[in-house]
Structure formats: C-alpha cells, structure tokens
Image: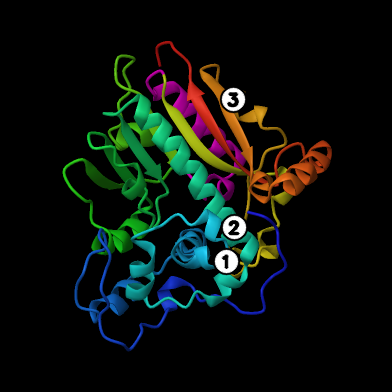
Amino acid sequence: MQQQPRSRRRVRPPSTLAPREEGDHHCPAGVASGASANTPSLLQRAHLPPVPSTLLIPLAARARGARYFPWLDCRDAVAGGLLERLGADVDALLDDLPTVFQVLWRTRAVKDAGRAFFAEHPQGLGANLGCGLTQHFQWLDAGANQWLDADLPEVMALRRPLLPAQGPRARQAAVDLARPGWWQRLGLPSHSGAPPVLLVCEGVLMYLQPAQVQAVLAEFAQCAPPGSRMVLDVLTRQAVGCAARNASVGPTGAEFHWGVGRMAELAAVHPRLRLLREQSVAEGAGWAGIVLDALWRPWLGAPVYGVATLGVRDGSP
C-alpha cells in the first residue's frame, strides 16, 4: 500500500466498534442473516490484533470505493451488507483515497487472473489465503470449480457467522501461513498429477518477516502441482517499517516487515517458480502513472505497490 500521511481521524479496531442502533438490514446474497443483537457480541469476542484488524480496509474500499473511482467498481454484492451488520465506522478509511484506489485496482487484477485461470482449468481449485471478509468466489465461481477461504483462527471465528461457505464447492479453514506445513493442513493437492491450484494472497505477506515470506513461497513451489499459480501483492522494500505513515494501516498498529527490491526476487526463492506477470498500481492511473513508475523504478527497484503472478514449473514437487 502506498505510504500516506497519517489521517487525523483514528479508526477504531473491530473489537471496539459500536453497533448501529437501527434495526437489521437486508443482507445481499452470501451474507448470513440473523438477529442484529448478535452482532455486537461477535465483534466484542473477536479482539482482533493489529494485522487481522486491517481486514476492514479492503472491506470498506470494496463496499463504498466506487463512488470515488467508478471505473474500478468491483460490484461487490457482499461488502456493503457486511459493513452494515458490523456497524463499522469506516469514514476515515474512505478518506484515504490512495489506499481505496489500490484495493479496487488490486481486486480487478485478482479477478482478471482468476477468471483466466478457471477458463483454462474450469474444475480447478482456488484458495484465498488471508481472506478476511472478502468473498472472491462471487466473481470466480465458474460453475464446476472449487473454492477455499482461509485465514487466522480469530478471523475465521468472525467470518463464519457472517459469511458461511456457499454450496458444496466452497469450504473454509483456519490457517497460519507463518507456520510451515500450511499446504498439508489445508488439504491442498500436492501430487504431480493433480489439477493446478490458484492461490490468492493479498494484504498478507507484507506483514510477515522476510524469512517467513520465503518459506511460504518455497512451500507453494515444493507442494503445488505443475501449472499452479499464486497471485500476491507486493510493496517496495523502501516501505518496510513505514506503516505508521499509511493513513489506513497506521492506526491499526500493524507494521510492514517485507518488501521487494526487484520483482525477480520472488521467483528466485525456488527453482520451480517463475514470474508470469508483474503489475504496478501506477498502471491504473494511465499514462501519467506509467511514466512516474518508470522514473521511480531505478531508485525503488520495484513498484511502490503492485501485484505479481507466480507459476509453478513442470516437475515433481
């Protein structure tokens, strides 16, 4: 996420958000309905620590960001209803327009990558690692594919009552990517004859230590069937340690620990990895953004913020 001055308006963490006093609201498809009286206790029990509490940032952007960037409208049928049920005050998050732009641009990049993958593998498996309260399957349900949403246990405890798995082709699981062995714990296919897998990992890796990120990428490379892909977002290494300067992330207390000096570093982690595509958020600003990105690259070595698609080469895991 792009570094921005700290907002004057502090965002309260989810565990302290007060519920709205209005009655229950209509929930779009995919959002569990229920008595609004249950919502405050859900939030109070969540007690989300700094990094998981950042899940409100993309939720707010996808729910209401289209009013500022209509050409990036992701048409999220779930996010608005979730905000209503959470009673979350996200005005300060929406004041951070650069981050709203980044989330919407990233969402479009993930949707494009996912649709391309499932067009090639219509019965494949997709998994959102660090799903938060995002529902990518609303866009990537190809009719015969499967989907897995996974996040830390405390996040899944909040998510499951609000966004239960929809249908027999979708499931949910708790996982900590910082612990090796997550591939097997999630029950992902690991033999060379299995269909390829699509992993989405957004808003996650920059909060891990560099050694932990390398371990995550290496485990993907070692375990994934040939043809599998991972779509992940990246920060320039210059942003490490600067989360306090981000208007949305700073108030949560989370910190950026990992960034890239060159995009090629991602594939260098393991011989089976290859960098299929790299994208910079600057592209979303048109020619002016592309020119600025070209000027920054010699100093930064990588996009200020971007998305990378990694592939797994043929060969036995």
Please identify the dominant SS of the magenta region: helix
Along the polypeptide, which appears first: circle 2 or circle 1? 1
Along the horizontal axis of the image, is 228 left or right of 213?
A: left
Along the polypeptide, which appears first: circle 1 or circle 3? 1
Asked whether residue 170 is in view, the answer is yes
Question: Nearest the camera: 233 or 238?
Answer: 233
Task: In the rendered view, tell whether residue 243 sits above or below residue 112.
Answer: below
Residue at point 36%, 24% (across, down): 120
What element does badge 2 sit on? helix
Q: Quadrant of the C terminus?
A: top left
Q: Which residue is mark 1?
A: 68
Q: Position of residue 93 (x, y in %)?
A: 56, 70
Report the disc number at residue 101.
Answer: 2
* Residue type (three-letter) at the residue carrying disc 3: Ala
Residue at point 56%, 33% (across, down): 214
Which residues are the magenta region?
A: 201-226
